Image (tube, helix red, strand yellow):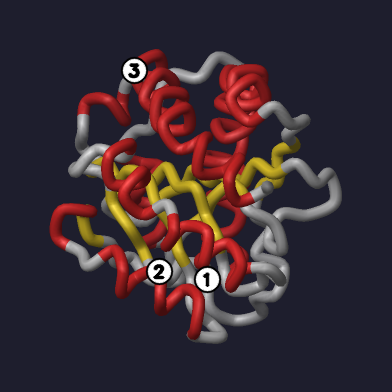
Amino acid sequence: MTFTGFEEKDFETFYIDGLDERMNAIKERIQPKFRAISEEIIEDLQAFTKQDMYLHVAKHARRTVNPPDDTWAAFAHNKRGYKKHPHFQIGLWHDNFFIWLAFIYELPHKSDIAKQFLQDQKDIEDRVPNDFYISLDHTKNEAKQIKDIDLTKALERFQNVKKGEFLIGKKLNADDPIVQDGDSLIQEIKETFHTLSPLYRSSMG
């Protein structure tokens, strides 16, 4: 499959009622596009991270009633899973496409990673553009641009709160021309992951 971008219909998936109905649409409309993106970016991501990287497409297997409000694909060095490891993510909410480097609450060494990031905070601020976003909870469609967030407080929360998380990357509106153009979005994902790869390598240190 050649990736040609995401269209309005893909984002409208999250307005479909019913768990089975929405999951079927996710599997038919969105997941093939995740796999097509992976084929385009995986070699670059492996070069950026100096790791073998594996695609993990979200299965939403724990859901029994409520349909998912977002869906994603993750890239991690571990073939069996991603949630307990630093990982890269691409995905959709109803109104945006996200590109994250993600450290979620299941990560066993997140306190050590947060401590390292706090020590490297000046380097992070110098390296990461102001229009990048930070999210503190991967389950909520909420994020703020770096220029509008207290990075120290965000990292301290990630370090000290059991369910604390830290995701950093980009969000693009669903109607952004980049999202709708396959080549442009592939390039945007590659550039974002390249910018964030030093942070990833530091977290794996």
Q: Are marks 3 and 1 in contact (CB under 8 Å)?
A: no
Q: Read off the residue under disc 1.
A: 67
Q: Amino acid at mark 3?
A: Ser
Q: Nearer the viewer, residue 43 or 34?
A: 43
Q: Residue 190, percent across and down?
A: 46, 24
Q: Amino acid at mark 2?
A: Leu
The number of numbered discs placed on residues in the rendered structure image is: 3
Q: CA distance from mark 2 to mark 1?
A: 31 Å
Where is residue 152 drawn, in percent x and y?
Answer: 31, 68
Residue lying at 50% horizontally and 76% vertically, measured from the top left: 159
**Number of other residues with Cα within 10 Å of mark 3, as a class: few under 14, some 14 to 19, many 20 or more:** some
Q: Residue at point 59% right, 18% down?
A: 44
What is the crowding at mark 1: few (fewer than 14 residues within 10 Å), some, or many (at least 20)?
some
Q: Earlier in the sequence, mark 3 or mark 1?
A: 1
Q: Quadrant of residue 85?
A: bottom right
Please tell me in which quadrant of the rendered image residue 118 appears.
bottom left
